[in-house]
Each structure stands twice: as C-alpha cells, then as structure tokens.
Amino acid sequence: MRMPRVPATVVPAALALAVSLPMTSAAGAAVGAAPPGPPRVTAAAAATTATEAARAAGAGLAARQAARDRLEFGPCPVAEGLGPDVRCGTLRVPVDYARPFGEQTEILVSRVAASGAGGVRRQGALVYNPGGPGGNGLFFPLVAGLPEWRRIGAAYDLVGYAPRGVGRSEHPLSCQDPAQYAQAPAGAAGARPDAAAKEARIAAARAYARGCAERAGAALGSYTTLNNVRDLHVLRAALGENGLTFMGASYGTYLGSVYATLYPGHVRRMVFDSAVDPDPQKIWYRNNLAQAPGFERRWADFRAWTARHHAAYGLGATPEAVQASYDRVRDALAREPAGGVVGTGQLHSAYLRAAYYDEVWPGRAAALAAFLRGDPRPLVSLAAPDPAAAVEGENATAVYTATLCNDAPWPGDWETWDRDNTELAGTAPFETWANAFLNLPCAFWPVRERQRPVDVGPRPDAPLPRTLIVAAERDGATPYEGALELQRRLGPRAGLVTEVGAGTHGVVGGRNDCVDAHVERYLLTGDTAGSRVTCAPHPEPAPVSLDDRAAIARGHPRALLPPVV
C-alpha cells in the first residue's frame, strides 16, 4: 500500500502505515482478472511446500535459541537520534529460515523500559510495527514522553525495531542509486497517461526490478511477510515474552494478523490500527486497486474543507473550484518547476499526503494559495525533495516493493494492469495511475518463488485471545472494508472501534481521546468493550494564515507518524 514518506521524529501527538492495495471499483465490484488460483500439485510445488515446512521448523529453532540468549540492551547508535533514554539491542535472525544456522542478518531493536509510574505492575513488552512494508519503527519508544502514552508506558516496555533490510540494518536493501530516486523535478503520472507515457513507465518498472535483483542478489526473495512474521516470533522470544503484545499500523496489521494465524499460542494482546484487508485474493494487487476510490474520496474531503474556508484561502467556494485552482498550479509547474525542483510529480506526492492526514490540510491549502498569489516559497518548502532523506526513502521503497512483489502472485501481463487502471481512473483519477506505476515492478519481478498469501484466521483448535481493531470510516489508504473483513476472520473475540466520519490514516495515539481510551483499556485490561463500538470524529483542523510560515510548514501539529512508504 502506498504511503508518503514521513520523518522519523516525534512531534506532539497520534500514530499512523503503510502501503498500496488492490481491487475493487468505486462501486465495490471486482475489476480485472483475479491473480492465478492455487497451483496444481507439481514436483516444484511439492518442493516449495517442503521448503516452507523447513522454514517453519527453522523459525522454531531460532526462537528457542533467542529465548536462551535473550536480547541485551545498551546505548543506541548516535546516528539513530533516539536520545539517551532509549536503549538498543541487536537481534540476529536467519536470512533463510530453512537454514537457521546459515547466513544471518541483524535487526536493530529499541526499547524504553516500563516506568512503573504510580506503582503500576509491569505487563511485559509492547512491540510496534509502523507498516510500509519498509517502515522503520525505532522511533516508537519515544512516545513514552507523550501524555497519551503515559499509562501504557507505565505498564509496558515500549519496543520498536527496524525490520530486515530497513534503515541502518546489516544488509539494507537498495534497488537504485538514491540520487536517481530523489531526482527532481519529475513529472506526475497524470490521470490519463498516453501510450508513450505508459511505455516509458513500463521500461522504468523493468529497470527497477532488474536493479533490485542486481543489488540484492540471492537474498532478494527473503523479503516476505512470512519472514517478517518469523523475525517477530524470534524477537518475542528474545524479549523473554511467551505471549506477544503487539500493535501494528497499516501493513503492520497484516503482519500481526499473519502472526496470529501462524502462532496463535504466542498471542497475548494485539491492536490493529487501520487494517489491511487480509483476504488472500486481495493480497496485494487487488488491495492496491481498492485504494484508488478511497484516495479519491479523501481528496474530495480535502477540497470540500478548503472550499468551506474560501475566505481564508481564496481557492474557490466549491470543491470543483478548488480542483481548478490545483489544476492551475499543476499546469504552471509543468511549464516551469518551482525553485527548479518542484514539478508535477513532487506536487502530486505532497498533496497525496492530504489524502492520508487531515492535519496537513491547512498548510497544503495555504501553499496553493501563496503560489497563485505569486509566492512559490511555501510550496517549495513542502514539496521539494530532501537530499538528506534520499537514502532512507530509496531503502524504504525497495523493501516495500520487494515484500509486496514476493508475497503473492501479480498479473504478469501489461494488458491486465492497463485495463484495470484505465477503468478505475475514469472515476478515481487522483491516484490511480501513480499507484499502478509504483507497483508495476511486480509484473516483471525476477524472483521465481512467489509466496501464497496466508489464509488469515484462527484454527478451531487454537482460539485467539481478545484482539482489537481500530479504523477510520473514510480511510483511503486502508479502506474500512478491510477492518470489517479482518474482524470477520479473527472471529467473535475481535473488537472493532470505528472513528465515524473521519479518514485520517492511523487512528491511535493522540488524535481522538475516545479511540485512545478504548486502546488503553484493552492494553491494560484485555477488555475490548464489546464487538463494535464507535467514536465521534476528531475535530477538523482550523485554517492558517498565509502569513504564518511556521504554521504552513508544520504538517502534523498533533501527530506521531511513523516513516512509511
């Protein structure tokens, strides 16, 4: 699932993740051919099954070894910028779990120990994954200093980690030169790319897939959700926990749900924030298609909000007029990039953030208004790529791409992609083609052994404890239907908290007091407060003055957002 890049810093207040998804039209009907069905039982399929059995056994061996060795924590690498209160440790896991004592890779883990404030009893470790895939969760222990996490931080060690291949891990994955990744200005995919534009994107996708293979070598196939789950299983054991207490956002919810399916006896409590639809037929091609109408809806929400504040911004008193103002800015950038670096591609990426987080609406509207009044500086400040972040961004995109491409079958013929996305773009033009081209390397992926998606859900002989799903009703990145499907699959002991009428991606941790109260109660007591409960939406943001540069630049005044793709 597609996610914008967000700095890994803590700013006053709410968790967000990650990812691009498949497959329904705006009306909800399936579009395009489904990915290939279950393969016939051939010799190759039998060998794959045997290999997966060996990997499952290898994960058990690695977890038992980790439980004996335990993770040791000391000062964090200075380069991570986590400060003296956060401690770090290095977890070693097999590159290939079929060879548990073969080549290893290192995963950096961060932790703040439970404070025990007020004499609260420690309940164990709470492990967080921010999604992506490719998101770096090392920042998570920093939430211990935020008031909305104080009671949870009193009872739990707060644990974050950089998944395999992410960040400054031992083997960070890369698919292209970071300078090429951050090249600017760039052109946007557009709502209706012509044949020449499509051919250029196909060539770029093929080249990107080749770059992944050339840079990663044989290890490229190891970036999978199943391996991420096995790594999480080893991490749980290395923390000395028999039962995993886990919170995942966006892709992190899929990671958690697969973990719960494979290791139900080691689940203690789980929070799923902004749930990916885990239906195996939707992982991942159809899930990415499903994002297009969701993002279109949220783009409409931003335009409607901006129109209501026409007096502040002057961008138009109707959503259609606001769209016309945005189009004028886009057309101007197509002729002459702002500051020499903000083209239509940078503009689109910056305003895709508005489809994720309503906190950015005031600054995004103000930057458009300032540009149309002759001042491009706010827009350049918001949209220009940061060369210092190029390595991190390229790495996150590489891990995202490799994991999704390895996880499941994808259509290998361009005709399917072209048909499905042309149809979607007719009603959801804002993000359809940009998302399609982001994921197009999966059509040409050089790894032969694709995973078969796990059929998420507990077994009758291994019921799960109570779990909690949290979702915003108008989320575009992970449409609400995914939360309903995850609840159905996890069964009657899964509770669902819905923030009605809201659409910001990532609900937990400071945006909505009602949601936070439910999550806190669940983590502290295990109580989900019933099967389904609702919370009123968090307040809409207020407009900012065009003269307030700091307010325009401030993207998330009350949000703790993990770095996601």
Image (tube, rainbow, N blue to C red):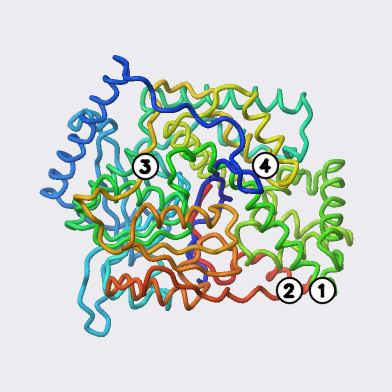
Nearer to the camera, 139 or 388 = 139
Indicate the secondary structure of the residue bearing disc 1. Answer: helix
Question: Residue under circle 2?
Answer: 543
Where is residue 525 shown, x and y percent of the image? 27, 74
Question: Residue under circle 1?
Answer: 312
Disc 4 and disc 1: Cα gap in Å?
A: 31 Å
Disc 3 and disc 2: Cα gap in Å?
A: 41 Å
Q: Quadrant of residue 173?
A: top left
Question: Around disc 1, counting alpha carbons within 10 Å, would you say few (fewer than 14), some (14 to 19), or many (20 or more)?
Answer: some
Question: Around disc 4, counting alpha carbons within 10 Å, would you say few (fewer than 14), some (14 to 19), or many (20 or more)?
Answer: many
Disc 1 and disc 2 in contact, CB within 8 angstroms:
yes
Where is residue 426 shown, x and y percent of the image? 75, 41
Question: Residue under circle 4?
Answer: 432
Indicate the secondary structure of the residue bearing disc 3. Answer: loop
Disc 3 and disc 1: Cα gap in Å?
A: 46 Å
| Amino acid tagged 2 | Pro
Where is residue 338 shown, x and y percent of the image? 80, 48
Indicate the secondary structure of the residue bearing disc 4. Answer: helix
Question: Of tags 3 and 2, which is closer to the observer?
Answer: 2
Question: Of tags 4 and 3, which is closer to the observer?
Answer: 4
Residue at position x 84%, y 60% in the image = 375
Disc 4 and disc 3 in contact, CB within 8 angstroms:
no
Q: Residue furthest top?
A: 43
Residue at position x 29%, y 41% in the image = 106
Question: Around disc 3, counting alpha carbons within 10 Å, would you say few (fewer than 14), some (14 to 19), or many (20 or more)?
Answer: some
Question: Residue under circle 3?
Answer: 169
